[in-house]
Amino acid sequence: MLCVIQRVSSSSVSVEGKLIGEIGEGLNILLGVKKGDTANDIKKLVNKIVNLRIFKDENNKMNLSLFDIEGEALIISQFTLAGNLKKGRRPSFEESESPEIAKNLYEEFITQMSDYGIKTQSGEFGAMMDVTIHNDGPVTFILDSKELS
C-alpha cells in the first residue's frame, strides 16, 4: 500500500462540481492499493501517519504530530500510485488491486483513521475528483507499507 502524505493548511475534494470533503490544517493523503495489500498494511500506515512528527512547534521545528495539533485528514483514493512506469511510455496498472478489494481496503483505511480520533474526510472511490491542496511548506512524504516495521 502506498501513500503520498502532504502537510496542508487546507484541502478539499469535489466530484462533478459538488464539494464532498474539506479539511483545515492536517494531512492530505493519497492512497494507492496494490495487489496483496491487507488490513495489516492499513494498520501499519495509519499508526505511522497519525504519529509522524511533521508539524511545526513553537520553534519552527518538525516536532508535532497530527494528534498534537488536533489536525484533520482528507483521504483520496489514488490507484495510479500503483502504476509501473519502468517500461514503455504508458503506465502499467498490473500491480493495482482490483476495484472491489481496493475499495474495501480504502474504506477500512478511512475507518481506522477515524478510530484514532482524527477528523477524517474522504473522496469518492473510483470517481473523477478535483482535489485542491494547499501544501504547507511544502512538506510531502511517500510511505510504502511494505517498508514499515
Image (cartoon, rainbow, N blue to C red):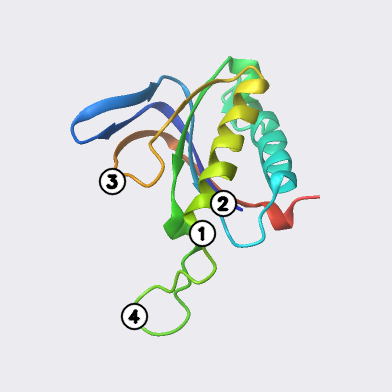
Who comes first in sequence, dot 2 or dot 3?
Answer: 2
- What whole-number distance in Å separates the C-alpha atoms at marks 4 and 1? 23 Å
Tag 2 and tag 1, C-beta contact below 8 Å: yes
- What whole-number distance in Å separates the C-alpha atoms at marks 2 and 3? 19 Å
**Vertical relation: 57 (above or below) 53:** above
Q: Position of residue 74 (x, y in %)?
A: 46, 30
**Vertical relation: 110 (above or below) 22:** below
Who comes first in sequence, dot 4 or dot 3?
Answer: 4
- When asked about the image quadrant of residue 16, the answer is top left
- When asked about the image quadrant of residue 134, the answer is top left
Q: Nearer the viewer, mark 2 or mark 4?
A: 2
Crowd around label 1: few <14 · some 14–19 · many ≥20 (10 Å): few
The kind of residue on which mark 3 rests is Met
**From where the camera sits, is residue 33 visible?**
yes
Tag 4 and tag 1, C-beta contact below 8 Å: no
The kind of residue on which mark 2 rests is Ile
Tag 4 and tag 3, C-beta contact below 8 Å: no
**Vertical relation: 117 (above or below) 6:** above
- What whole-number distance in Å separates the C-alpha atoms at marks 2 and 4? 27 Å
The residue at which mark 2 appears reads as 101
Q: Position of residue 119 (x, y in %)?
A: 53, 18
